[in-house]
Image (cartoon, grey):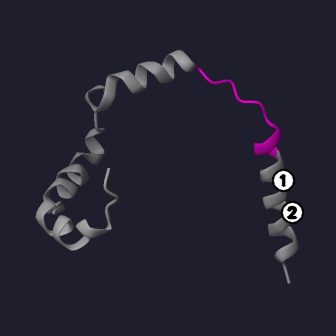
Amino acid sequence: MGRGRAKAKQTKVARELKYRSFETDFSSLERELRSGSEGHEVPPAYADLVEESEDDEDPSGDEREYGHLRKSG
């Protein structure tokens, strides 16, 4: 029991997403895509997380273990 409200909420959200019109600023999107990763700065609060993720990367381990799963181009 109690699933009726959750399902009704999901249906409401799905309808809203389906029928709502979005105004896309294509010039802003183009600028963002052209700037690449150089145009984005990491907020100071997340700088330590970026450093941790860069330290955790081990290119040799992943390639060796999962390299066979890659599609050949």
Tell me: residue 44, above or below residue 29. below
Q: Is 41 on the left-hand or right-hand side of 57?
A: right
Q: Determine which residue is flagged by label 1.
A: 12
Instruction: Count how many numbered circles sit on residues in the image.
Output: 2
Q: Is 31 on the left-hand or right-hand side of 22?
A: left
Callout 2 secondary element = helix
The residue drawn where x is 83% and y is 48% is 15
Q: How crowded is the residue under tag 2: few (<14 C-alpha within 10 Å), some, or many (20+)?
A: few
Q: How crowded is the residue under tag 1: few (<14 C-alpha within 10 Å), some, or many (20+)?
A: few
Question: Quick check: can you spot residue 36?
Answer: yes
Expressed as whole percent of the image width and height from the top left, the position of residue 57 reads 17, 60
The residue drawn where x is 86% and y is 63% is 8
Quarter of the figure with the N terminus? bottom right
Q: Alpha-carbon distance for marks 2 and 1?
A: 6 Å
Tell me: residue 3, above or below residue 33. below
Tell me: residue 70, above or below residue 42. below
- Amino acid type at circle 1 is Lys
Q: Is 19 one of the magenta-colored residues? A: yes
The magenta region covers 16-25
Main secondary structure of the magenta stretch: loop
Q: Is 67 on the left-hand or right-hand side of 27?
A: left
Q: Determine which residue is flagged by label 2.
A: 8
- Amino acid type at circle 2 is Ala
Callout 1 secondary element = helix
- In this view of the protein, which residue sits in the foreground, 52 or 35? 35
Q: Is 71 one of the magenta-colored residues? A: no
Expressed as whole percent of the image width and height from the top left, the position of residue 56 reads 17, 62
